[in-house]
Image (spheres, rainbow, N blue to C red):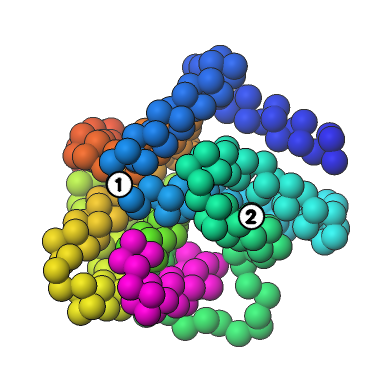
Amino acid sequence: MKDYFSLQLVMTNRKIKEAGINPFFGYLLVLLVFILLSAYIYQKTDFAKYLVLLICFSLQLRLSEKNRTDFLITTFGDKTKKIKRVLENLIVCIPFVFILVYKSNFNETSILFLMSIVLALISLQTNLNFTIPTPFSKRPFEFPVGFRKTFFIFPISYVLTIIAIIVDNLNLGIFSMLLIFLTSSSFYTKPENEYYVWIHAETPKSFLKNKISIATKFVTLVVSPILFSLFIFYLTDLVMIFLFFLIGLLFLWAIIFVKYSAYPDEMNLPEGIIIALSLFLPPLLLIVIPYFYRKSINRLKAILND
């Protein structure tokens, strides 16, 4: 157990060093940004506690990816794998728990602990022996593959929306909508094989335009039941609901551009910090999107025809 977590620390330190940052200062920077942004969102919005949960769950979902859980099962066995995953999720949630407890959000703290354990015991790859139908085409691959791996998130989000309407809690309804956006954004975090980019007979601009267009169409399709339900029951808050929908779209676009700005490599720590900042400070997306769009164009020129 100790060796496993020591290895995880070594691998994390290596990634931070590859970004040109001393690991000690890297952790200190992340902690400082986390504290300052947490204080900022609690000062600016009543939605802060839901945003804290959303970010924590997104980090934990990444730890439940199929390849990762398959490796743990193969190496350690199912029982030990579950223990390690529970410990990992609890470690991830510790800073978020401190924030929630400090702000006296005790109900949300309990939910966070419970969901951290639940997410640790599941894999994003279902073991069901039938294919889950999707409303998406076979090409491109991100949404069909991602939807089948995380399909349980979508009914949960729809149920949360129903609960939000019953208890008259608009913030919970918006949280359920953002949960779908965050889950959909996770489909674009891992770089695909270069061949699956090279086969497109397109310019970099056309390639990115198609990626954004298809991602927008598909995420709008799955989020529309929540969106229209909130529109119907919260007529006086249409502008705010639409604003959060727009922020969700912009965040999805930013993820796509950040992915291809580093392609064929994975996103590194500085890019991850920028994405986290954008989630806390949505206006920053107006700077992040054009910046990483230009970087994506330059990266893709080596693979696609210009």
- For the question of whether residue 158 can be seen, the reply is no
Specify the label residue 45 is tagged with: 1
Quarter location, residue 295: top left
Residue 49 % position (x, y):
43, 50
Residue lying farthest to the front in this orientation: 104
Taking 291 as reference, is 193 left or right? right
Q: Does the magenta stretch include residue 266?
A: no
Taking 244 as reference, is 4 left or right? right
Closer-to-camera residue (61/115): 115
Disc 1 secondary structure class? loop
| Dot placed on the residue nearer the N-terminal end, 2 or 1 | 1
Q: Would you place residue 157 above or below residue 268 in this image?
A: below
Residue tagged 2:
113
Q: Is residue 158 magenta?
A: yes
Q: Residue at x 49, y 73 (%)?
A: 156
Quarter location, residue 14: top right
- For the question of whether residue 12 can be seen, the reply is yes
The secondary structure making up most of the magenta span is helix
Q: Would you place residue 76 above or below residue 263 in this image?
A: below
- The segment highlighted magenta reads 145-173
